[in-house]
Image (cartoon, helix red, strand yellow):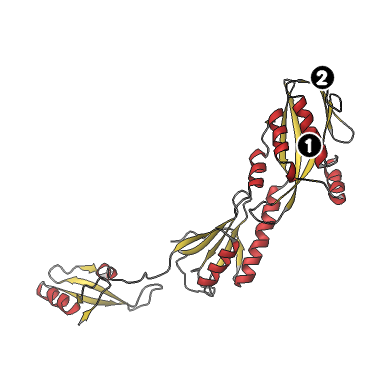
């Protein structure tokens, strides 16, 4: 009997068997007396009658396979909606979802061929997946880039000028909350802009004196001949508020930023410190994870799946 293969070359089993018999070899079947999980009950082998050795015949048939034995590979999607759609296309009753909540590189991964959800259930291959890396917004990346990094006076002033639209006024609850936690008031956008423009005036001058006021704010005095509109003293707030979306086309978050400065050799270095950025990222990832799990009706976990074998 001939079997037509995908490359139009007939596979004549009878001829192969006859050739094997004449060569002193044959294809035989080994049977398992005791079942082994994940192993078929019978295995075809090639028997060399002269030496008595057994050889694998799977490769002989694999070359004629028209489809893979199982689904494998990882689809990388660029939107949350695409992740939901591809999960609905491939999910099984054992599929699961994992969310990596690392604020610096958050992601959601669906594993379609996950282990069976039963006591003593069969293990699966974990090789078929869909992966979504949250695309960080340009605004978030800009602030994350300077997070905790000392900036020279002009560099800091120019950065604030370039990102004026991302500053937000604190509401009454925020102002009271942060005053209670840190002992200073939160700056309004116009106050921060005035600070940045005052710094540009003092770009080439040295600090004469700096003190901490009773309000918790700082006050810097420059030693110079010319003065800005407020004189040569500038009040430095301890915190301001950003209103940006951490993820591209995502929900806007209100993110507090600590503002510190250090006077070294009568020059000022400025430091912006995002306040608990992990919280804002994690909250958004968890909201999106809940949405994916709800719409796909799959179990979900925080963490990363096992490596596929």
Let me know if residue 152 appears in the view.
no
Q: Quadrant of the C terminus?
A: bottom left
Q: Secondary structure at mark 1?
A: helix
Residue 175 at x, y percent in the picture: 85, 46
Earlier in the chain: of badge 1 and badge 2, it is: 1
Q: Crowding at label 2, few (<14), some or many (≥20) Cα neighbours within 10 Å?
A: few
Q: Crowding at label 1, few (<14), some or many (≥20) Cα neighbours within 10 Å?
A: some
Q: Secondary structure at mark 2?
A: loop
Q: Which mark is residue 161?
A: none
Let me know if residue 132 appears in the view.
yes
Residue located beneath label 2 in the image: 226
Nearer-the-camera pick, 42 or 52: 42
Direction from residue 139 to residue 111 in the image, left or right: left
Residue located beneath label 1 in the image: 193
Q: Is 176 above or below relative to 195? A: below
Q: Is 29 above or below relative to 275? A: below
Instruction: Determine the residue positioned at 32% across, 72% down.
Output: 66
Quarter holding residue 80: bottom right
Quarter holding residue 101: bottom right
Direction from residue 303 to residue 37 in the image, left or right: left
Instruction: Determine the residue positioned at 63% across, 53% down.
Output: 248
Residue 37 at x, y percent in the picture: 41, 73
Do residues under tags 1 and 2 come within 8 Å of each other at their CB atoms?
no
Q: Is 94 above or below relative to 148? A: below
Q: Residue pushed farthest bottom?
A: 1
Q: CA distance from mark 1 to mark 2?
A: 20 Å
Direction from residue 238 to residue 277 in the image, left or right: left
Q: Residue pushed farthest top?
A: 225
Residue 61 at x, y percent in the picture: 27, 71
Q: Quadrant of the N terminus?
A: bottom left
Q: Residue pushed farthest left?
A: 22
Nearer-the-camera pick, 170 or 231: 231
């Amino acid at each position: 009997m001939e079997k037509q293969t995908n490359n139009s070359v007939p596979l004549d089993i009878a001829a192969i068997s006859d050739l094997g018999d004449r060569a002193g070899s044959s294809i035989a079947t080994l049977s398992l007396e005791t079942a082994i999980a994940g192993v078929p009950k019978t295995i075809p082998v090639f028997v060399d009658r002269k030496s008595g050795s057994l050889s694998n015949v799977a490769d002989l048939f694999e070359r004629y396979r028209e489809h893979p034995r199982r689904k494998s590979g990882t689809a990388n999607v660029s939107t949350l909606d695409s992740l939901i759609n591809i999960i609905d296309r491939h999910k099984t009753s054992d599929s699961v979802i994992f969310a990596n909540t690392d604020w610096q590189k958050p992601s959601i991964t669906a594993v379609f061929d996950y282990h069976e959800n039963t006591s003593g259930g069969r293990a699966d291959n974990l090789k078929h997946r869909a992966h979504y890396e949250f695309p960080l917004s340009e605004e978030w990346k800009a602030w994350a880039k300077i997070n905790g990094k000392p900036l020279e006076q002009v560099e800091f002033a120019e950065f604030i000028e370039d990102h004026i639209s991302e500053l937000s006024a604190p509401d009454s609850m925020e102002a009271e909350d942060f005053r209670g936690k840190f002992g200073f008031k939160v700056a309004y956008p116009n106050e921060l802009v005035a600070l940045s423009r005052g710094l540009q005036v003092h770009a080439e001058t040295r600090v004469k004196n700096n003190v901490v006021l009773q309000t918790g704010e700082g006050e810097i005095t420059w030693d110079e001949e010319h003065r800005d509109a407020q004189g040569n003293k500038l009040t430095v707030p301890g915190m301001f508020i950003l209103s940006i979306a951490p993820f591209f086309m995502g929900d806007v978050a209100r993110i507090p930023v600590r503002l510190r400065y250090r006077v070294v050799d009568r020059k000022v270095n400025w430091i912006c410190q995002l306040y608990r950025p992990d919280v804002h990222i994690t909250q958004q990832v968890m909201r999106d994870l809940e949405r994916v799990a709800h719409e796909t009706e799959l179990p979900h976990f925080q963490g990363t799946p096992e490596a596929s074998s």
